Amino acid sequence: MSEFFNSIKQGLEEAIDYSKGRCPKAVVHKFSPIDVKNIRAKMGMNQNEFASAFGISISTLRHWERGDRSPQGPALVLLNVVAKEPHAVLKALAS
C-alpha cells in the first residue's frame, strides 16, 4: 500500500475511534452557527457586492441569509474569518 493510502486509512481509523469516544486527545474544530446577513450588514455591502467580493454565488448567499441552507466546509471557514477580519480578507483577495 502506498504512503498516501496509509495516511487516509489512519485518518479514517482515528475518526472511527473518535466517534466511539476512544480518542480523547483528538483536535476537533467546531464552528458555531453563523449569521451571514449580519456579517454582510456590518461590512456595509449589499448582497451582490458581498457575493462578488468573496466569490459566492448570489443564490447561495440568499439561501444562507434566509436560513434555507447553512454554509459548510471551506465556505464556513471563510465566513468565520470574514466575520473576524473582514479587511484582511479583502486585502488578501485583492492581491
Image (cartoon, rainbow, N blue to C red):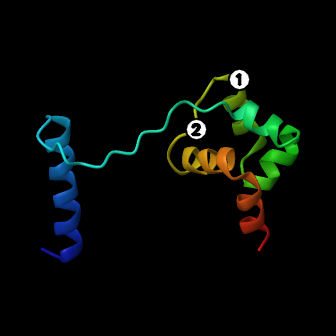
Q: Residue at x 74, y 46 (%)?
A: 57
Q: Position of residue 73 (x, y in %)?
A: 50, 46
Give the left or right position of residue 37, taking residue 80 as reference. right
For the residues marked 2 and 1, what is the alpha-carbon distance in whole angstroms? 12 Å
Give the left or right position of residue 60, taking residue 28 as reference. right
Q: What residue sits right under mark 1 in the picture? A: 66
How many numbered markers are drawn?
A: 2
Q: Residue at x 79, y 68 (%)?
A: 94
Q: Which mark is residue 71?
A: 2
Frontmost residue, 71 versus 33:
33
Whether residues under marks 2 and 1 lie with C-beta atoms below 8 angstroms apart, the answer is no
Q: Which mark is residue 77?
A: none
Q: Classify mark 1: helix, strand or loop.
A: helix
Please say if 70 is above or below 58.
above
Please say if 94 is above or below 89.
below
Q: Amino acid at mark 2?
A: Pro
Q: Residue at x 14, y 34 (%)?
A: 20
Report the quarter where the N terminus lies.
bottom left
Q: Position of residue 14 (x, y in %)?
A: 17, 51
Q: Amino acid at mark 1?
A: Arg
Give the left or right position of residue 80, taking residue 94 as reference. left
Frontmost residue, 89 versus 65:
89
Frontmost residue, 38 versus 11:
38
Q: Position of residue 5 (x, y in %)?
A: 20, 68
Q: Position of residue 37 (x, y in %)?
A: 75, 31
Q: Classify mark 2: helix, strand or loop.
A: loop
Circle 2 residues within 10 Å: few <14, some 14–19, many ≥20: many
Circle 1 residues within 10 Å: few <14, some 14–19, many ≥20: few
